[in-house]
Image (cartoon, rainbow, N blue to C red):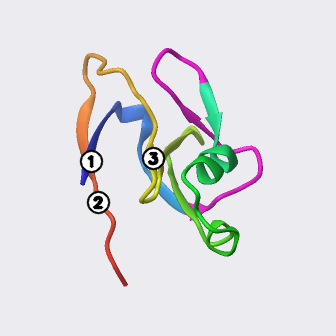
């Protein structure tokens, strides 16, 4: 389980498959492509196609499920949101 701090305008969160061009926000304001994260974490190619992401209402990737969480500064009014992966 991991916690991220999100503001009201980032809700609702949505789960969807990875799309070309998806990027994770990193500390310092830079971004990393989800494709590159999966390669760096050595996720097998056949599993990459089935990978899911959680995105906010603005379309930003919040969590590459089970792999990496985006960095969001703790802003005034932000709420802690616990993210956990459930096995099916």
Residue 84's label in the rendered image is: 2
Secondary structure at numbered mark 2: loop
Residue 2's label in the rendered image is: 1
Mark 3 vs mark 2: which is more N-terminal? 3
Q: Residue at x 58, y 66 (%)?
A: 51
Q: Which residues are magenta?
A: 16-30
In three-dimensional space, the C-alpha distance between marks 3 and 1, rounded to whole angstroms, equals 10 Å
Q: Are marks 3 and 1 in contact (CB under 8 Å)?
A: no
The image position of residue 36, as x and y in percent, is 67, 44
Residue 37's label in the rendered image is: none
Mark 3 vs mark 1: which is more N-terminal? 1
Q: Quadrant of residue 7?
A: top left
The image position of residue 76, as x and y in percent, is 26, 16
- In the picture, the quarter occupied by the C terminus is bottom left
In three-dimensional space, the C-alpha distance between marks 3 and 2, rounded to whole angstroms, equals 12 Å
Q: Residue at x 49, y 57 (%)?
A: 14
Of badges 3 and 2, the one in the foreground is 3
Instruction: Say whether residue 16 is left or right of residue 13.
Output: right
**Residue that sits furthest to the right in the current view:** 20
Q: Residue at x 65, y 66 (%)?
A: 48
Q: Residues within 10 Å of mark 3 (few under 14, many from 20)?
A: some
Vertical arrangement, residue 87 with respect to residue 4, above or below: below
Q: Residue at x 45, y 58 (%)?
A: 65
> Is 67 inside the magenta-drawn segment?
no
Q: Are marks 1 and 2 in contact (CB under 8 Å)?
A: yes
Residue 68's label in the rendered image is: 3
Secondary structure at numbered mark 3: strand
Out of 49 and 6, give the one closest to the viewer.
49
- In the picture, the quarter occupied by the N terminus is bottom left
Q: Quadrant of residue 72?
A: top left
Instruction: Say whether residue 22 is left or right of residue 61.
Output: right
């Amino acid at each position: 389980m991991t916690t991220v701090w999100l503001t009201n305008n980032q809700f609702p969160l949505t789960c969807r498959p990875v799309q070309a061009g998806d990027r994770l926000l990193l500390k310092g304001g830079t971004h990393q492509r989800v494709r590159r994260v999966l390669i760096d974490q050595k996720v097998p190619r056949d599993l990459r196609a089935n990978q899911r992401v959680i995105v906010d209402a603005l379309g930003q990737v919040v969590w590459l499920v089970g792999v990496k969480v985006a960095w969001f500064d703790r802003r005034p009014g932000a709420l802690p949101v616990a993210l956990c992966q459930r096995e099916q």
